[in-house]
Amino acid sequence: EEFYESRALKPSEVSNKIIRRSVAKSLASLHKVDLAELDKMPMFMKMLEEKGLMKVVEEKAKKDIFSTIEQKWLYEILPLTSEDEIAFLKEVVPTGKDSVVFSHNDLHSQNILILDKTQKIVLIDYEYSSYNYRGYDIANFFNESIIDYNNPNYPYYSIDSNKYPSDYDLIDFIKYYLFFFKFSEIQFDETLALNDDDYFKQVIKDNYNLDEFNLEIEQLFEEVRVCTMFSHYYWVLWSVVMSKNPDIQFDYLHYAHKRYEIYQKLKQDYYGSEYPKIQMILLNH
């Protein structure tokens, strides 16, 4: 950030297909890193197993520092640390052979730079990095696209769920993520691949099976759907821990409760209805 002439991505630029596809390429490149010395247990599963974050949240909630409305928010949030909630989350974790990768774990627009000269995408700020589910980084990037942290007024952020990208945008991201994850060693014209859908499809046809590629898109789409819940869940608990710091203006507990509400809606949707079959965009002809 200090040495590159660059700017940070804007949350709304997830809707710019070239920028979105370039982020997918950079993320695929990160996810291919193999750090043999690191523990390969996914960060999210480790949190569920060890329950350290949950215990800190429970201890924090006992402190006599919260207003009446904040106590109400905590009363709603605290069941997230229960055995039932943890059992639900463990039940839905991704289990595919390619599901666990070296991950960023805090991927959002402020941690993505666009270089001034080349327009190249650079991911920064790796302090949360570890092995985790590949869908988590994708889900976190899309979740964060609805949040504006530049609100000058209380609570110093805003969330607009209507800005969440469409399934088409998410599938487009997944297509290019898988493409660059699989084919980066193959000789092809990257600019054409990012801009020309027919060329993109032809590279896949020449090097893989389109039906198989479509199945992998569908599988990853499902993983991201689950990890969208995981991302909100994690940041709810983390924000409770961060709350009530007199040196920080941002209202972390207000933020935790808002993300809790989104998590509950996503969980309801997950349980409540059969998700419609997504229409794959890659055709065999």
Image (tube, rainbow, N blue to C red):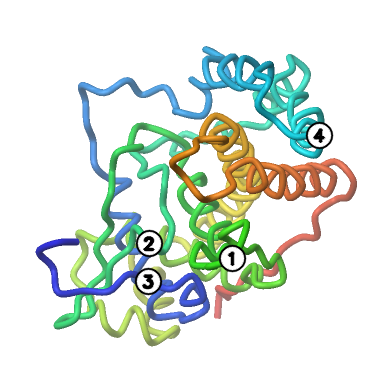
Q: Local crowd at mark 1 within 10 Å, few (<14), some, or many (≥20)?
A: few
* Residue at image coords 68%, 20%: 64
Contact, mark 4 vs mark 2 (Cβ under 8 Å): no
Q: Read off the residue under disc 1.
A: 153
Image position, residue 255 (x, y; %): 63, 48
- In the rendered image, which quarter is residue 202 located in? bottom left
Mark with earlier residue (3, 4): 3
Image position, residue 125 (x, y; %): 28, 49
Q: Read off the residue under disc 2.
A: 110
- Give the alpha-carbon distance from disc 3 to disc 2, as whole Å: 6 Å
Q: Read off the residue under disc 4.
A: 68
Mark with earlier residue (4, 2): 4
Q: Read off the residue under disc 3.
A: 9
Against 44, residue 107 (above or below) is: below
Contact, mark 3 vs mark 2 (Cβ under 8 Å): yes
Contact, mark 3 vs mark 4 (Cβ under 8 Å): no
* Residue at image coords 70%, 30%: 66
- Give the alpha-carbon distance from disc 4 to disc 1, as whole Å: 22 Å
Mark with earlier residue (1, 2): 2
Image position, residue 267 (x, y; %): 78, 42
